[in-house]
Amino acid sequence: MIRRILQNFATRLVTALLSFGIVWLTARYLGATGRGDVSLFVTDCAALLLFIGLLGGSSLIYLAPQRSLWHLLVPAYAWATVVCGVGTAAVGLLRDVPRAYLGHLLALSLLQAYFSINTALLLGRKREAGYNFLTVLQVALLAGGLLLAFGGLRWRAVPVYYYAAYVAYGLPLLLSLGLLLRLPDRWNAGRGLRATARELATHSRGAHFSNILAFANYRLSYYFVAHYADARAVGVLSVGVALAEAIWLIPRSTALIQYVDLVHATDKHAQVEPTLRVARLTLLTTALAVLVLCALPPAMLAAVFGAEFGAARPVILRLAPGVVAMVVNVICSTYFAGVGRYRINNLATTVGLLVTLPACWLLIPPLGISGAALATTLSYLASTGFLVWQFGRATGAGLPAFLPGKADLDYARSLVKKIR
């Protein structure tokens, strides 16, 4: 398990570094306003992808070991097509955006949706090497395309992001289809398709509703800032958020492997102690990473991203407590998802959203992006507190069980020696 976690972590580390490169390229060459426009587009795409998960998402991983991949893929693709079409139309009605923007939103959200469905199915069949390769390739193509356009061709405009994204999602999508075709599953038209679609819908609604609420907790502040300020403020906020959330690659790497293992485990309770051990090490590592990030001076941020982005440091400082708390949040929510108790995750994200809405409304108008960061941290702390309480009720392990001690440090040292 540890080796798989390290492999997954290495993949996410490379992905995070490339994603950091994308943030840097868009901030450096497009400025705060251009970076804000890109951030809003990415957020719109992410919102559509969330609703796609109502008939897919992590439930594809859950059902892939038991069902024909093609019986899962067909309803997931059909639902994704409907959601992207309806969602794009809704964005056009709710926001004043150009028609070309809507065209790119529809096309790119479809590519991303199909790609995420394919990779989820690969992961569900434990084809982690293929999953990791495609994940890195997608981000590398996007970063490489932006670098070529901005640096080599000196084409520095927001539409460059759209064109680079077509290549970055189109090619990996084709490769992922090739990997699926190599699996032994065969298509039997009509046999079990309807039953599988119903089962997928049943699991997805419970499993994915919390992700929709979590998205509101993570990104609702962008729309508040865009409303009360402008795209430039969104750009500065997005850089601070991107740097802080990049640290989440640590807990998400461990959580993904834990989820797959929980899904395949026959004795779910036996997974509690390994979960807590990994959680403690993850919390320690994340806290150290957050301290390093908080130590970065505004002058360094301005030198790296541009003069406008020194103002991102207050955002990072106000996000830091929430980023650390979310380690425990991710571990607990992964456990409940793995044992099929989706209602608890839904309630936790609801608690967070009940904090996010009034906090954004009260804090962003007077404090701007600093208020947005505070609202986000308050939401993270509230939802994490609820999950820790529920985890304690389910397993008997309260908050002290997540705090690292000497035994965990000794265990970490032994792992390092084994790797050497």
Image: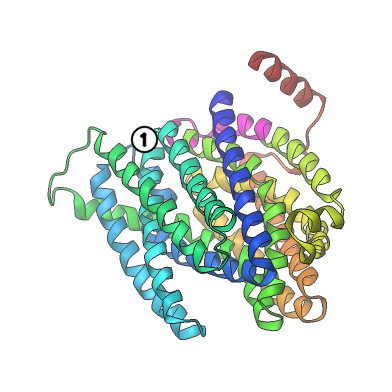
Colouring method of the image = rainbow
| Magenta span main SS | helix
Quadrant including the C terminus? top right
Q: Position of residue 229 (x, y in %)?
A: 71, 80
Answer whether residue 351 is visible to the viewer in this image. Answer: no
Q: Position of residue 390 (x, y in %)?
A: 64, 50
Which residue in the structure is indicated by mark 1?
Answer: 125
Q: Position of residue 359 (x, y in %)?
A: 74, 73
Answer whether residue 222 is visible to the viewer in this image. Answer: yes
Q: Position of residue 292 (x, y in %)?
A: 82, 43
Decide: is 105 above or below 387. below
Q: Residue at x 65, y 62 (%)?
A: 29
Q: Residue at x 70, y 19 (%)?
A: 416
Quadrant including the N terminus? top right
Q: Residue furthest front?
A: 153
Give the structural element (helix, strand or loop) at label 1.
loop
Give the magenta-colored segment's residue range. Answer: 262-278
| Towards the viewer: 356 or 287 | 287
In the picture, measured across the screen, residue 81 lies left or right of residue 119, that is left
Decide: is 399 above or below 31. above
Q: Residue at x 50, y 41 (%)?
A: 136
* 266 drawn magenta: yes
| Towards the viewer: 15 or 7 | 15
Q: Quadrant of residue 110?
A: bottom left
* 31 drawn magenta: no
Decide: is 120 above or below 160. above
Q: How many residues crowd around disc 1 within 10 Å: few (fewer than 14), some, or many (20 or more)?
A: many
Tell me the amino acid under the disc marked 1: Arg
Q: Residue at x 61, y 29 (%)?
A: 274
